[in-house]
Image: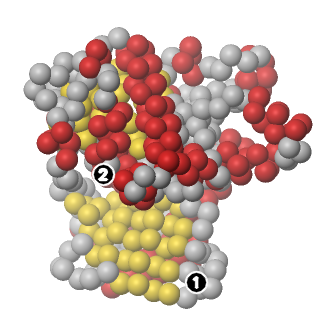
Amino acid sequence: MTTPTKEGSAAVQARRVLVLNSGSSSVKYQLLDMENRSRLAIGLVERIGEETSRLLHTPLTGGAATRERMGRIADHEAALKAAAEELAADGLGLDSPELASIGHRVVHGGLRFTEPTVITEEVLAEIERLVPVAPLHNPANIIGIRTAQVLRPDLPQVAVFDTAFHTTMPEYAARYAIDVETADAHRIRRYGFHGTSHAYVSRKAAELLGRTPEEVNVIVLHLGNGASASAVAGGRCVETSMGLTPLEGLVMGTRSGDIDPAVTFHLTRVAGMSVDEIDVLLNKRSGLVGLCGDNDMREIRRRIDEGDERAALAFDIYVHRLKKYIGAYSAVLGRVDAVVFTAGVGENSAPVREAAIAGLEEFGLAVDAGLNAVRSGEPRLISPDYARVAVAVVPTDEELEIAGQTFALVERLGRTAQPGQAEPLGRVDN
């Protein structure tokens, strides 16, 4: 791939951002034009390293159809090169002087990274230092960053951290009640995840209410296969359900959420299970799939309609946990202006929303059945006019949030950020 000349870069105003979300065996990407916040193309490379690798690329300009590539894609570098070829075929090549930056989703930033950050060797070293608390995510994020740096070494690469939005939590909310020296030595505390989603949705909820983020208190329920709740006061997160890892909190597709820690000791002593086996149990064989064998809420609702008792119990457990968090976060906030549903289940499952709010009338909450049944990709209220607390559905857009944060940082630095610059880094943890 060629790199644009400085003369070419100066002649064109760079307003595009490529967003990369690198997983252990996949890369999701989106190219956005930040002049009008529109998507130019989206894509997914999956099963990297396997013979059955697949690339799906969808250009969103000119009416072209989705293209599919099948066949082995050896590694992340090959995956990004293949994605770059697809973009170039649509006239959106990564060598374009219109590309301002590449924004990377990084799952764990600890306490040091409280805002989007230009990636340097120092930053990468810190992301790597956090691998023990994000072993499934940070290594893949690092691979994506390294690969993108090779493809476009002249561009500022920006990390946007899932944990950053939650770094505003007060210590009494973030600390676990264990020995302080042990906790500090091993960085054990509540970090929270899905931060870009909670930031985006809480801000959009304020807009929906016709107010600024600083004026409202909202409870955000991000309900996908992974699920998390947050209490946001005046635009700042003050509590969140996920903790040291994404395992804590709500019932999820395959994760248990909250559980007595002594269950792990019990399974070791009584069942003879290893730490790794318990890890797999709680992260991949629990939650909805552990309770009823399905983690697709649509399938669970279909089974309930057919009288399946296991599916009904799984649904009730899922909803019961949601109610507990709505109640707890109402107490934390003191005043709640809105409860907001987002992500795949939150945006699309009317029965989940209805059941989660049912019985909470004393909290000022209610759902209008007609409004709740409407399917729409737009932010909307689903509560009746008389409800004291608004109930809303706000579709999340983590890629747009990452692109927005990335572009804002690059603009703030005058698009002069080069590899070697290390600001802003945020505060330093222990």
- Residue beneath the point at 45% across and 65% down: 28
User: 330 or 171: which is nearer to us?
Assistant: 330
User: 347 or 190: which is nearer to us?
Assistant: 347
220 vs 178: above or below? below
Residue type at tag 1: Thr
In the picture of the structure, the residue carrying the numbered disc 1 is: 52
The quadrant of the picture occupied by the C terminus is: top right
Q: Position of residue 201 (x, y in %)?
A: 31, 39
- Residue beneath the point at 86% across and 43% down: 271
Secondary structure under the numbered disc 1 in the rendered image: loop
User: 56 or 152: which is nearer to us?
Assistant: 56
Secondary structure under the numbered disc 2 in the rendered image: helix
In the picture of the structure, the residue carrying the numbered disc 2 is: 348
Q: How is the image coloured?
A: secondary structure
Q: Determine crowd level at label 2: few under 14, some 14-19, many 20+ residues with C-alpha closer than 10 A.
A: many
Residue located farthest toward the left when viewing the structure as drawn? 385
271 vs 64: above or below? above
User: How much space separates mark 2 and mark 1, taking CA atoms?
Assistant: 31 Å
The answer to whether residue 238 is seen in the rendering is no
State the image quarter where residue 357 is shown: top left
- Residue beneath the point at 58% across and 37% down: 257
Q: Position of residue 6 (x, y in %)?
A: 36, 68
Q: Determine crowd level at label 1: few under 14, some 14-19, many 20+ residues with C-alpha closer than 10 A.
A: few
Q: Position of residue 217 (x, y in %)?
A: 30, 21
